[in-house]
Amino acid sequence: INETGGRIVSGGVFAIDGGYHPGTVDNFGTIIGGTTYGAGVSATGIALFGGGTITNEAGGTIIGYYHAITTAGGSTDSVANAGTIIGGQGLGDSAVSMRYGGTLTNSLGGTITGATDGVHLGDAGSVGNAGQITGSGGAGVLLGYGGTLSNAAGGVIAGSRRGVEAEHNAGTIANAGTIIATDTTAVAGTTVAGVYLGAGGTVTNAATALISGLWQGVYVSAAAGTVDNAG
């Protein structure tokens, strides 16, 4: 537990390195990985290579020069955020990288901001958002091998090229908030989509909800897809 007012700071490597055994981190304070010039790919706020559970409480801040958070345990990994998570500001990568999937929950008031993707799940998993997730240079949320995403009313997921992207396996997207691709300069014919399903899947957009992209609201590729829109 990192208590309110507590600071855990690393100059060039992990601020917290859980090794290859499952770990649990509960943060109320500030955790920063990578503060020195030239910090490398180990400059991560929290790294749990054996997986586990990370909770960033309201008022908590986790920052990484590379990733803010990395997990690599598998489908049981869990990240819950009600505070501020910022990643990739030095090396240009995602804020949260869950290499082998898992579950991420971003609560009301929680913000996650990545230089490329906001959240990247490298395997199937699930994301629930009621706060704000931003990918400044890629996707707000990238589901690398499909999975599920739920965006609640008031929730915002924004990415430069894709708000939400699901690849390789089908994605199931339920939106009651806002999902948007923010790039306004891409040339015609490129894929700048609110939701991109690279292997088919399902999109449900509730009344008053918004899915928006410069060239496509929803783009479905490679397999059949279903879109149910009331917004």
Image: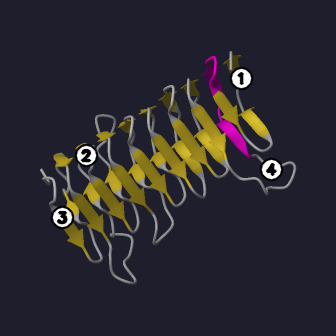
The residue type indicated by label 3 comes to Arg
Tell me the number on the disc at residue 143: none
Contact between marks 1 and 3 (CB within 8 A): the answer is no
The residue type indicated by label 4 comes to Thr
CA separation in Å, label 2 and label 4: 37 Å
- Sequence-wise, the earlier of marks 3 and 2 is 3
Label 4 packing within 10 angstroms: few (<14), some (14-19), many (20+): few
- Select label 1 or label 4 by which is in front: 4
Q: Is residue 161 above or below residue 156?
A: below
User: Would you say residue 154 sits in the magenta stretch?
Assistant: no
**Left or right: 83, with 205 as reference point:** left
- Sequence-wise, the earlier of marks 4 and 3 is 3
Residue that label 2 marks = 51
Label 1 packing within 10 angstroms: few (<14), some (14-19), many (20+): few
Residue that label 1 marks = 224
The residue under the point 28% across, 72% down is: 13
Q: Can the viewer see residue 221 in this picture?
A: no
Residue that label 3 marks = 7
CA separation in Å, label 1 and label 4: 21 Å
SS class, disc 2? loop
